[in-house]
Image: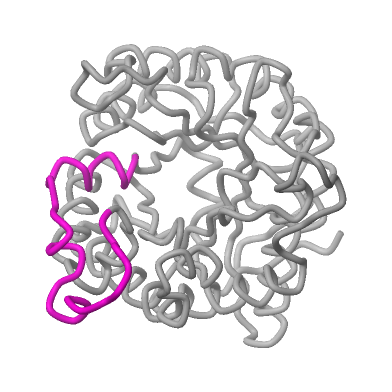
Amino acid sequence: MKPITYTRGQALPALLARRIMILDGAMGTMIQRFKLTEADFRGQRFQDHRRDVKNNGELLNLTRPDVIRDIHEGYLAAGADIIETNTFGATSIAQDDYELGPLAREMNLEAARIARAAADKFSTPDKPRFVAGALGPTPKTASISPDVNDPGARNVDFETLRAAYYEQVEALVEGGSDLLLVETIFDTLNAKAALFAIDEYFETSGERLPLVISGTVTDASGRILSGQTVTAFWYSVRHAQPLAVGLNCALGAALMRPYIQELQRVADDTFISCYPNAGLPNPMSETGFDETPDVTSRLLHDFAAEGLVNIVGGCCGTTPEHIGAIREAVEPLATRPLKRNLFYKEAA
């Protein structure tokens, strides 16, 4: 494969070769801390919208950008090197559930601009901060039937997914993203539609951003929901030449270990990312999950000490407190070295 020269995020490969980088934590968990009402989500602009929009976190990019900015800055202050745009559910497919699909492009553009401003505010020559344009899996799956009585049924097709992801990528890059993150992949075919759209955008625009691909293992079988093992998943997406591949969410750090170990063995020509959730649901805890910052950071410290990871952070249930603890735990440790470097080169 011919190595890639990036047009944005050029510093990332060299930084990852020197140290472990910190990704931010959960957006939804932090939004819940604000205890926003239906009226808060609607704002003035959507006060007459006919569908309920509470818990549509991506709408806050338009109605309460101050909330999203505050969350980004909290993670940056805790030491995050990379912050994700608030766009996990900002495809037209996902927003159609709220009858807001036509606004998906605007949501992504504003989300990237909010994150860009926050990252620039905290960046220094010694510690640059980066914006990852986040692409979630959508609530529809191209590989699995929504009807148990009709295995061949599908509620979305590849072309619909591709078009939705292309629109999202275009806006995320226009808004100032440094890299793209295709995350929480439970259906590899959905991910392939996102990767196709990304490559199509790169070819059309002349841009070439670093790409991180992150799957999610849904149970102790060690497979993603559409049936692939971690190894099979890697070989299905390797053609995209990602800067990093990894796992996020689902099991929590304690149960992720064998799958991260498997991934770091087979993906020896790219960096490895890991951002677990904060454990099992626990409604009695502040975050709703049962792993404290100390527990999560200790587990990720062990991953780093074992030479498994290059990027670490948090998913569901994690907070700036988790990210601060993770940073302190892994900062003194060496990053995982690559056995070979086939995918990218630093810009001249």
Quarter that holds the N terminus: bottom right
Does residue 70 appear in the picture of this structure? yes
Residue reaching furthest to the front: 149
Q: Is residue 149 above or below residue 275?
A: below
Question: In this orientation, which residue lies closer to the viewer: 279 or 306?
Answer: 279
Determine the residue positioned at 51% across, 68% down: 91
Q: Which residues are magenta?
A: 26-54
Residue placed at 31% from the left, 47% from the top? 27
Q: Nearer the viewer, residue 212 or 228?
A: 228
Q: Would you place residue 155 above or below residue 306 in this image?
A: below
Q: Is residue 271 left or right of residue 188?
A: left
Q: Residue 6: x, y in percent?
A: 60, 69
Residue drawn at (22%, 77%), measured in percent from left and top? 46
Q: Position of residue 35 (x, y in %)?
A: 12, 45
Q: Residue 325: x, y in percent?
A: 27, 24
Dominant secondary-structure state across the stretch colored magenta: loop
